[in-house]
Image (cartoon, grey):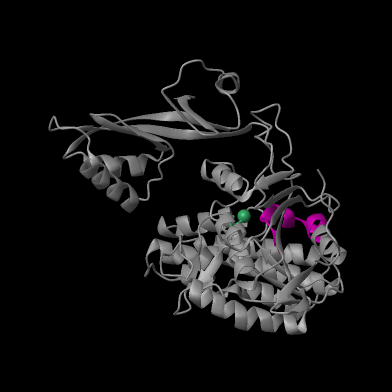
Amino acid sequence: MEIRLPEKEIYLCSDNSEIALMEKLLVFKFGGACLKNVEHIRNAANILKNFKGQRILLVVSAIDKTTNALERVVNSFFAGDSNASGYIEEIKHQHVTLAHELGIIDPFAINEIEDSFIDAIWLLEDEIHDAYEYVYDQVVSIGELVSSRLVVQFFKNEGLDVQWLDVRDVVKTNEDYKNATIDWEATQEGADKIISRAFESSEIVVTQGFIGSTRENNTTTLGREGSDYTASVLAYCLDAASVHVWKDVEGIMTGDPKSYEQASLIGELSFDEAIEMCYFGAKVLHPKTIKPIQNKGIPLYVRPFFNVENSGTFISDKQDIAYLPIVIKEENQALVEVGERDFSFIAENHLSEIFAILSELKIKVYIMRNTAISFVFSTKDDELKLQKLEARLGASYNVKYRRNLTLLTIRHGSMDDVKKISGQSQFLFEEVYGETIQVVYQS
Ligand code: ASP
Ligand code: MG
Protein backbone atom coordinates (compact mmCIF):
# COMPACT_ATOMS: atom_id res chain seq x y z
CA MET A 1 0.00 0.00 0.00
CA GLU A 2 1.26 3.44 -0.83
CA ILE A 3 0.35 6.56 1.06
CA ARG A 4 1.15 9.77 -0.75
CA LEU A 5 1.87 12.70 1.46
CA PRO A 6 0.47 16.10 0.64
CA GLU A 7 3.30 18.55 0.13
CA LYS A 8 2.10 20.48 3.12
CA GLU A 9 0.45 18.75 6.03
CA ILE A 10 -2.35 20.99 7.12
CA TYR A 11 -4.53 20.05 10.03
CA LEU A 12 -7.89 21.34 11.10
CA CYS A 13 -8.07 21.79 14.82
CA SER A 14 -11.00 23.04 16.79
CA ASP A 15 -10.34 25.61 19.45
CA ASN A 16 -13.61 26.01 21.37
CA SER A 17 -16.04 27.26 18.78
CA GLU A 18 -13.44 28.59 16.40
CA ILE A 19 -11.87 26.39 13.75
CA ALA A 20 -8.28 27.33 13.17
CA LEU A 21 -5.98 26.18 10.44
CA MET A 22 -2.71 25.20 12.00
CA GLU A 23 0.36 24.20 10.15
CA LYS A 24 2.30 21.69 12.15
CA LEU A 25 5.91 20.83 11.60
CA LEU A 26 7.39 17.58 10.38
CA VAL A 27 10.26 15.83 12.12
CA PHE A 28 12.75 14.11 9.82
CA LYS A 29 15.60 11.84 10.80
CA PHE A 30 18.55 10.94 8.60
CA GLY A 31 20.68 8.13 10.01
CA GLY A 32 24.41 7.75 9.45
CA ALA A 33 23.93 5.45 6.45
CA CYS A 34 21.91 8.20 4.71
CA LEU A 35 24.79 10.65 5.05
CA LYS A 36 27.71 8.43 4.24
CA ASN A 37 29.06 10.18 1.13
CA VAL A 38 28.59 13.02 -1.33
CA GLU A 39 25.85 11.24 -3.29
CA HIS A 40 23.86 10.52 -0.14
CA ILE A 41 24.17 14.03 1.28
CA ARG A 42 23.06 15.44 -2.08
CA ASN A 43 20.06 13.14 -1.94
CA ALA A 44 19.28 14.41 1.58
CA ALA A 45 19.22 17.97 0.21
CA ASN A 46 16.93 16.88 -2.63
CA ILE A 47 14.48 15.33 -0.19
CA LEU A 48 14.31 18.60 1.72
CA LYS A 49 13.73 20.49 -1.54
CA ASN A 50 10.81 18.16 -2.22
CA PHE A 51 9.12 19.43 0.92
CA LYS A 52 9.65 23.10 0.17
CA GLY A 53 7.30 25.38 2.08
CA GLN A 54 6.99 22.94 4.94
CA ARG A 55 8.65 23.54 8.32
CA ILE A 56 10.98 20.65 9.08
CA LEU A 57 12.98 19.78 12.16
CA LEU A 58 15.76 17.51 10.90
CA VAL A 59 17.54 15.25 13.36
CA VAL A 60 20.81 13.77 12.09
CA SER A 61 23.13 10.99 13.27
CA ALA A 62 26.86 10.81 12.91
CA ILE A 63 28.09 10.13 9.38
CA ASP A 64 28.28 6.44 8.47
CA LYS A 65 30.32 4.49 11.05
CA THR A 66 31.78 7.54 12.83
CA THR A 67 30.26 6.57 16.19
CA ASN A 68 32.04 3.20 16.09
CA ALA A 69 35.30 4.94 15.20
CA LEU A 70 34.90 7.41 18.08
CA GLU A 71 34.12 4.54 20.44
CA ARG A 72 37.41 2.95 19.41
CA VAL A 73 39.21 6.22 20.16
CA VAL A 74 37.80 6.26 23.70
CA ASN A 75 38.70 2.61 24.22
CA SER A 76 42.25 3.16 23.05
CA PHE A 77 42.55 6.16 25.39
CA PHE A 78 41.49 4.03 28.33
CA ALA A 79 43.78 1.22 27.21
CA GLY A 80 46.68 3.66 27.63
CA ASP A 81 47.34 4.19 23.92
CA SER A 82 49.16 7.52 23.72
CA ASN A 83 47.99 8.06 20.15
CA ALA A 84 44.27 8.38 20.97
CA SER A 85 44.24 12.05 19.97
CA GLY A 86 45.96 11.04 16.71
CA TYR A 87 43.07 8.73 15.85
CA ILE A 88 40.54 11.48 16.41
CA GLU A 89 42.61 13.80 14.19
CA GLU A 90 42.11 11.20 11.48
CA ILE A 91 38.32 11.33 11.94
CA LYS A 92 38.50 15.12 11.76
CA HIS A 93 40.46 14.87 8.54
CA GLN A 94 37.84 12.55 6.99
CA HIS A 95 35.11 15.09 7.75
CA VAL A 96 37.09 17.98 6.29
CA THR A 97 37.78 15.91 3.17
CA LEU A 98 34.07 15.15 2.79
CA ALA A 99 33.29 18.85 3.23
CA HIS A 100 35.72 19.69 0.42
CA GLU A 101 34.18 16.99 -1.79
CA LEU A 102 30.82 18.64 -1.16
CA GLY A 103 32.22 21.91 -2.43
CA ILE A 104 32.36 23.58 0.99
CA ILE A 105 35.23 26.05 0.71
CA ASP A 106 34.22 28.87 3.03
CA PRO A 107 37.08 28.94 5.59
CA PHE A 108 34.66 29.91 8.34
CA ALA A 109 32.58 26.79 7.66
CA ILE A 110 35.65 24.55 7.56
CA ASN A 111 36.78 26.07 10.86
CA GLU A 112 33.45 25.23 12.44
CA ILE A 113 33.83 21.62 11.34
CA GLU A 114 37.37 21.44 12.74
CA ASP A 115 36.41 23.23 15.95
CA SER A 116 33.86 20.54 16.75
CA PHE A 117 36.84 18.32 17.68
CA ILE A 118 38.83 20.72 19.87
CA ASP A 119 37.47 19.84 23.31
CA ALA A 120 37.72 16.13 22.66
CA ILE A 121 41.31 16.42 21.42
CA TRP A 122 42.31 18.31 24.58
CA LEU A 123 40.64 15.73 26.73
CA LEU A 124 42.47 12.90 24.96
CA GLU A 125 45.85 14.65 25.16
CA ASP A 126 45.55 14.90 28.94
CA GLU A 127 45.80 12.18 31.59
CA ILE A 128 42.67 10.21 32.45
CA HIS A 129 40.80 12.22 35.09
CA ASP A 130 37.23 11.11 34.59
CA ALA A 131 35.12 7.99 34.49
CA TYR A 132 34.93 6.05 31.22
CA GLU A 133 31.23 6.79 30.67
CA TYR A 134 31.75 10.53 31.05
CA VAL A 135 34.69 10.64 28.66
CA TYR A 136 32.79 8.40 26.23
CA ASP A 137 29.96 10.91 25.98
CA GLN A 138 32.26 13.92 25.56
CA VAL A 139 34.12 12.22 22.69
CA VAL A 140 31.43 10.14 20.96
CA SER A 141 28.98 13.08 20.81
CA ILE A 142 31.36 14.80 18.37
CA GLY A 143 30.01 12.55 15.60
CA GLU A 144 26.58 14.19 15.62
CA LEU A 145 27.89 17.70 16.30
CA VAL A 146 30.17 17.62 13.27
CA SER A 147 27.77 15.83 10.89
CA SER A 148 25.09 18.42 11.60
CA ARG A 149 27.57 21.28 11.00
CA LEU A 150 28.63 19.74 7.75
CA VAL A 151 25.20 19.09 6.28
CA VAL A 152 23.88 22.50 7.30
CA GLN A 153 26.68 24.18 5.41
CA PHE A 154 25.98 22.06 2.35
CA PHE A 155 22.21 22.65 2.55
CA LYS A 156 22.84 26.41 2.76
CA ASN A 157 24.99 26.24 -0.34
CA GLU A 158 22.10 24.41 -2.02
CA GLY A 159 19.86 27.38 -1.28
CA LEU A 160 17.83 25.78 1.51
CA ASP A 161 16.51 28.02 4.27
CA VAL A 162 18.22 26.20 7.10
CA GLN A 163 19.84 26.82 10.49
CA TRP A 164 21.90 24.73 12.93
CA LEU A 165 20.69 24.15 16.45
CA ASP A 166 22.62 22.65 19.36
CA VAL A 167 20.28 19.99 20.72
CA ARG A 168 22.10 20.07 24.06
CA ASP A 169 20.35 23.37 24.77
CA VAL A 170 17.03 21.55 24.46
CA VAL A 171 17.33 17.84 25.29
CA LYS A 172 18.08 17.73 29.00
CA THR A 173 18.92 14.49 30.76
CA ASN A 174 20.04 13.01 34.05
CA GLU A 175 23.71 12.21 34.65
CA ASP A 176 23.60 8.59 33.62
CA TYR A 177 26.39 8.99 31.07
CA LYS A 178 26.31 6.67 28.04
CA ASN A 179 22.66 5.85 28.69
CA ALA A 180 21.04 9.04 29.92
CA THR A 181 17.34 9.42 30.70
CA ILE A 182 15.35 12.37 29.36
CA ASP A 183 14.29 15.09 31.78
CA TRP A 184 10.94 15.66 30.12
CA GLU A 185 10.01 18.85 31.89
CA ALA A 186 13.26 20.65 31.07
CA THR A 187 13.23 19.29 27.50
CA GLN A 188 9.67 20.48 26.92
CA GLU A 189 10.66 23.92 28.16
CA GLY A 190 13.69 24.00 25.85
CA ALA A 191 11.64 22.88 22.87
CA ASP A 192 8.98 25.53 23.49
CA LYS A 193 11.49 28.31 23.85
CA ILE A 194 14.46 27.46 21.68
CA ILE A 195 13.16 25.36 18.79
CA SER A 196 10.01 27.37 18.32
CA ARG A 197 12.09 30.54 18.16
CA ALA A 198 14.43 28.99 15.59
CA PHE A 199 11.47 28.36 13.29
CA GLU A 200 10.63 32.06 13.35
CA SER A 201 13.67 32.70 11.17
CA SER A 202 14.15 29.46 9.16
CA GLU A 203 12.03 26.90 7.44
CA ILE A 204 14.36 24.02 8.29
CA VAL A 205 16.15 23.50 11.59
CA VAL A 206 18.90 20.86 11.73
CA THR A 207 19.92 19.35 15.03
CA GLN A 208 21.66 16.30 16.49
CA GLY A 209 20.18 12.98 17.49
CA PHE A 210 21.55 10.74 20.24
CA ILE A 211 23.00 13.49 22.44
CA GLY A 212 21.77 15.75 25.20
CA SER A 213 23.12 17.48 28.26
CA THR A 214 22.75 17.56 32.01
CA ARG A 215 21.46 20.60 33.84
CA GLU A 216 25.14 21.54 34.36
CA ASN A 217 25.57 21.40 30.56
CA ASN A 218 27.77 18.31 30.45
CA THR A 219 27.18 16.36 27.27
CA THR A 220 25.39 13.01 27.60
CA THR A 221 24.30 10.32 25.13
CA LEU A 222 21.04 8.37 25.07
CA GLY A 223 22.35 4.89 24.17
CA ARG A 224 23.56 3.56 20.82
CA GLU A 225 21.25 4.14 17.86
CA GLY A 226 19.44 6.76 19.95
CA SER A 227 18.78 9.29 17.17
CA ASP A 228 15.38 7.79 16.36
CA TYR A 229 14.49 8.32 19.97
CA THR A 230 15.58 11.99 19.83
CA ALA A 231 13.33 12.52 16.80
CA SER A 232 10.44 11.02 18.73
CA VAL A 233 11.10 13.03 21.91
CA LEU A 234 11.24 16.29 19.98
CA ALA A 235 8.16 15.40 17.91
CA TYR A 236 6.31 14.86 21.17
CA CYS A 237 7.44 18.16 22.67
CA LEU A 238 6.66 20.12 19.51
CA ASP A 239 3.35 18.40 18.74
CA ALA A 240 4.65 17.52 15.29
CA ALA A 241 2.33 16.36 12.50
CA SER A 242 4.43 13.28 11.78
CA VAL A 243 7.90 11.77 12.08
CA HIS A 244 9.78 10.51 9.02
CA VAL A 245 12.72 8.21 9.62
CA TRP A 246 14.54 7.94 6.27
CA LYS A 247 16.43 4.70 5.72
CA ASP A 248 18.50 3.09 3.01
CA VAL A 249 15.90 0.30 2.83
CA GLU A 250 12.30 0.28 1.54
CA GLY A 251 10.79 0.36 5.02
CA ILE A 252 10.20 -2.22 7.74
CA MET A 253 10.18 -5.81 6.50
CA THR A 254 8.41 -8.85 7.95
CA GLY A 255 11.86 -10.30 8.66
CA ASP A 256 15.50 -10.08 7.74
CA PRO A 257 15.69 -11.09 4.04
CA LYS A 258 19.11 -12.64 4.75
CA SER A 259 17.62 -15.34 6.94
CA TYR A 260 13.94 -15.25 5.94
CA GLU A 261 13.33 -15.66 2.23
CA GLN A 262 9.66 -14.63 2.28
CA ALA A 263 10.43 -11.32 3.96
CA SER A 264 8.27 -8.55 2.49
CA LEU A 265 7.65 -4.88 3.12
CA ILE A 266 5.11 -4.02 5.83
CA GLY A 267 2.85 -1.23 4.58
CA GLU A 268 1.21 -0.44 7.87
CA LEU A 269 1.90 -1.20 11.51
CA SER A 270 0.18 -0.25 14.73
CA PHE A 271 2.28 1.44 17.41
CA ASP A 272 1.88 -1.61 19.65
CA GLU A 273 3.03 -3.97 16.94
CA ALA A 274 6.09 -1.78 16.30
CA ILE A 275 6.93 -1.79 20.02
CA GLU A 276 6.65 -5.58 20.18
CA MET A 277 8.95 -5.91 17.16
CA CYS A 278 11.60 -3.56 18.53
CA TYR A 279 11.44 -5.08 22.00
CA PHE A 280 12.18 -8.57 20.72
CA GLY A 281 15.11 -7.44 18.63
CA ALA A 282 13.95 -6.16 15.23
CA LYS A 283 16.69 -3.69 14.33
CA VAL A 284 14.38 -1.19 12.70
CA LEU A 285 14.06 1.56 15.25
CA HIS A 286 15.48 2.30 18.66
CA PRO A 287 13.09 0.49 21.06
CA LYS A 288 12.24 3.67 22.97
CA THR A 289 11.14 5.51 19.82
CA ILE A 290 7.47 4.59 19.65
CA LYS A 291 6.12 5.38 23.11
CA PRO A 292 6.39 9.20 23.12
CA ILE A 293 4.74 9.61 19.72
CA GLN A 294 2.15 6.97 20.51
CA ASN A 295 1.15 8.99 23.56
CA LYS A 296 0.28 11.88 21.27
CA GLY A 297 -0.92 9.83 18.30
CA ILE A 298 1.80 11.24 16.04
CA PRO A 299 2.28 8.86 13.08
CA LEU A 300 5.71 7.64 12.05
CA TYR A 301 6.95 6.75 8.57
CA VAL A 302 10.00 4.56 8.05
CA ARG A 303 10.66 5.39 4.44
CA PRO A 304 13.16 4.84 1.65
CA PHE A 305 15.81 7.47 1.32
CA PHE A 306 16.22 6.93 -2.42
CA ASN A 307 12.52 6.72 -3.21
CA VAL A 308 10.68 9.82 -1.95
CA GLU A 309 7.54 8.80 -3.80
CA ASN A 310 7.03 5.79 -1.53
CA SER A 311 5.98 6.23 2.04
CA GLY A 312 7.57 2.96 3.20
CA THR A 313 6.04 1.69 6.44
CA PHE A 314 3.37 3.79 8.11
CA ILE A 315 3.04 3.36 11.89
CA SER A 316 -0.01 4.78 13.63
CA ASP A 317 -2.68 4.02 16.20
CA LYS A 318 -4.77 2.16 13.65
CA GLN A 319 -5.66 -1.24 15.11
CA ASP A 320 -7.46 -3.43 12.58
CA ILE A 321 -4.50 -4.38 10.42
CA ALA A 322 -4.09 -7.86 8.93
CA TYR A 323 -0.49 -8.95 9.32
CA LEU A 324 1.61 -11.53 7.56
CA PRO A 325 3.85 -13.51 9.93
CA ILE A 326 6.57 -11.22 11.34
CA VAL A 327 9.87 -12.94 12.09
CA ILE A 328 12.51 -11.66 14.50
CA LYS A 329 15.66 -13.63 15.12
CA GLU A 330 17.99 -12.69 17.97
CA GLU A 331 21.24 -14.56 17.96
CA ASN A 332 23.61 -14.42 20.87
CA GLN A 333 21.14 -15.38 23.55
CA ALA A 334 21.64 -17.21 26.82
CA LEU A 335 19.18 -19.26 28.80
CA VAL A 336 19.54 -18.85 32.55
CA GLU A 337 18.10 -21.19 35.14
CA VAL A 338 17.94 -20.07 38.75
CA GLY A 339 17.14 -22.84 41.22
CA GLU A 340 16.54 -22.90 44.95
CA ARG A 341 19.33 -24.12 47.26
CA ASP A 342 17.35 -24.49 50.46
CA PHE A 343 14.73 -26.98 49.21
CA SER A 344 11.99 -24.38 49.28
CA PHE A 345 9.89 -23.40 46.28
CA ILE A 346 10.61 -20.44 44.05
CA ALA A 347 8.02 -18.11 45.49
CA GLU A 348 7.13 -14.47 45.03
CA ASN A 349 9.69 -13.25 47.56
CA HIS A 350 12.46 -15.01 45.63
CA LEU A 351 11.23 -13.68 42.32
CA SER A 352 11.18 -10.14 43.62
CA GLU A 353 14.73 -10.57 44.91
CA ILE A 354 15.90 -11.98 41.56
CA PHE A 355 14.20 -9.19 39.60
CA ALA A 356 15.72 -6.49 41.81
CA ILE A 357 19.17 -7.86 40.93
CA LEU A 358 18.32 -8.18 37.21
CA SER A 359 17.18 -4.60 37.15
CA GLU A 360 20.26 -3.39 39.02
CA LEU A 361 22.56 -5.21 36.58
CA LYS A 362 20.48 -3.94 33.64
CA ILE A 363 19.86 -7.48 32.41
CA LYS A 364 16.97 -7.54 29.98
CA VAL A 365 14.68 -10.56 30.18
CA TYR A 366 13.17 -11.66 26.87
CA ILE A 367 11.08 -14.69 27.83
CA MET A 368 10.66 -16.36 31.19
CA ARG A 369 8.91 -19.08 33.10
CA ASN A 370 8.83 -20.20 36.70
CA THR A 371 8.35 -23.76 37.87
CA ALA A 372 8.04 -24.83 41.49
CA ILE A 373 11.77 -25.17 41.93
CA SER A 374 13.30 -22.92 39.31
CA PHE A 375 13.01 -19.67 37.41
CA VAL A 376 14.15 -19.76 33.77
CA PHE A 377 14.66 -16.86 31.41
CA SER A 378 16.42 -15.89 28.20
CA THR A 379 18.63 -12.84 27.91
CA LYS A 380 21.50 -11.44 25.81
CA ASP A 381 24.60 -13.61 25.95
CA ASP A 382 26.79 -11.06 27.73
CA GLU A 383 29.51 -12.96 29.56
CA LEU A 384 30.41 -10.18 31.97
CA LYS A 385 26.82 -9.60 33.01
CA LEU A 386 26.17 -13.33 33.38
CA GLN A 387 29.20 -13.64 35.64
CA LYS A 388 28.02 -10.71 37.74
CA LEU A 389 24.59 -12.28 37.99
CA GLU A 390 26.06 -15.58 39.10
CA ALA A 391 28.16 -13.81 41.71
CA ARG A 392 25.14 -11.93 43.08
CA LEU A 393 22.73 -14.87 43.14
CA GLY A 394 25.23 -17.65 43.82
CA ALA A 395 25.03 -17.48 47.61
CA SER A 396 21.33 -18.34 47.78
CA TYR A 397 20.60 -20.00 44.45
CA ASN A 398 22.02 -22.46 41.97
CA VAL A 399 22.61 -20.56 38.76
CA LYS A 400 23.15 -22.40 35.48
CA TYR A 401 23.29 -20.96 32.03
CA ARG A 402 23.64 -22.06 28.43
CA ARG A 403 25.19 -19.72 25.94
CA ASN A 404 25.29 -19.21 22.18
CA LEU A 405 21.59 -19.72 21.59
CA THR A 406 19.05 -18.18 19.23
CA LEU A 407 15.73 -16.65 20.24
CA LEU A 408 13.16 -16.74 17.46
CA THR A 409 10.03 -14.65 17.84
CA ILE A 410 7.17 -15.00 15.40
CA ARG A 411 4.13 -12.76 15.57
CA HIS A 412 0.95 -13.74 13.72
CA GLY A 413 2.38 -17.09 12.68
CA SER A 414 2.08 -20.77 13.56
CA MET A 415 4.29 -23.40 15.16
CA ASP A 416 4.79 -24.77 11.64
CA ASP A 417 6.28 -21.43 10.60
CA VAL A 418 8.57 -21.56 13.64
CA LYS A 419 9.81 -25.03 12.74
CA LYS A 420 10.32 -24.16 9.10
CA ILE A 421 12.18 -20.92 9.76
CA SER A 422 14.37 -22.27 12.54
CA GLY A 423 14.99 -25.58 10.80
CA GLN A 424 14.50 -27.27 14.21
CA SER A 425 11.81 -29.51 15.59
CA GLN A 426 12.88 -29.48 19.25
CA PHE A 427 13.46 -26.40 21.36
CA LEU A 428 15.09 -25.67 24.70
CA PHE A 429 12.31 -23.27 25.56
CA GLU A 430 8.92 -22.47 24.01
CA GLU A 431 6.41 -19.79 24.89
CA VAL A 432 3.10 -19.05 23.22
CA TYR A 433 0.99 -16.09 24.18
CA GLY A 434 -1.65 -14.34 22.09
CA GLU A 435 -0.15 -13.55 18.71
CA THR A 436 3.41 -14.32 19.81
CA ILE A 437 5.30 -17.60 19.60
CA GLN A 438 8.87 -17.69 20.92
CA VAL A 439 11.43 -20.45 20.98
CA VAL A 440 15.04 -20.70 22.09
CA TYR A 441 17.38 -23.20 20.46
CA GLN A 442 21.03 -24.01 19.99
CA SER A 443 22.34 -21.95 17.07
N1 ASP B 1 25.36 7.77 15.88
C1 ASP B 1 24.77 7.06 16.98
C2 ASP B 1 25.03 5.57 16.84
O1 ASP B 1 25.55 5.15 15.80
C3 ASP B 1 23.30 7.32 17.12
C4 ASP B 1 22.44 6.83 15.98
O2 ASP B 1 22.96 6.51 14.93
O3 ASP B 1 21.23 6.77 16.13
O4 ASP B 1 24.74 4.84 17.73
MG1 MG C 1 24.43 5.66 13.68
Task: Relative to 21, say whether 380 is above or below.
Answer: above
Q: Which residue in the rendered view is the most extreme toward the top?
A: 425
Relative to 388, is 24 above or below?
below
Q: Nearer the viewer, residue 327 or 369?
A: 369
Asked if 24 appears above or below 82 in the picture, the reply is below
Instruction: Report whether 371 appears left or right of 378.
Output: left
Span of residues in magenta: 28-41
Q: Quadrant of the N terminus?
A: top right
Does the magenta run of residues contain 170?
A: no
Residue 118 visible to the viewer: yes
| Residue occupying image coordinates x 29% and y 43% | 389
Residue displayed at 81% across by 74% down: 156
- Please check the rendered image and state whether residue 31 is part of the magenta-colored stretch, yes or no: yes
Q: Which residue occupies 28% across, 29% down?
A: 371
Numbered-mark total: 0
- The spot of residue 161 in percent (x, y) is 82, 77
Q: Position of residue 344 (x, y in %)?
A: 15, 32
Visible in this render: residue 169?
no
Horizontal arrangement in the rendering, residue 137 relative to residue 67 (left or right): left
Asked which quadrant contains residue 230, the reply is: bottom right
Query: Closer to the camera, 69 or 232?
Result: 232
- On the image, the x and y values in percent for residue 175 come to 41, 69
Which of the pair 274/137 is nearer the observer?
A: 274
Q: Is residue 442 left or right of residue 262?
A: left
Q: Position of residue 14 (x, y in %)?
A: 72, 74
Quarter where residue 334 is shown? top left
Figure quadrant of residue 257: top right
> Residue extending furthest left?
342
Q: Quadrant of ligand 1?
A: bottom right
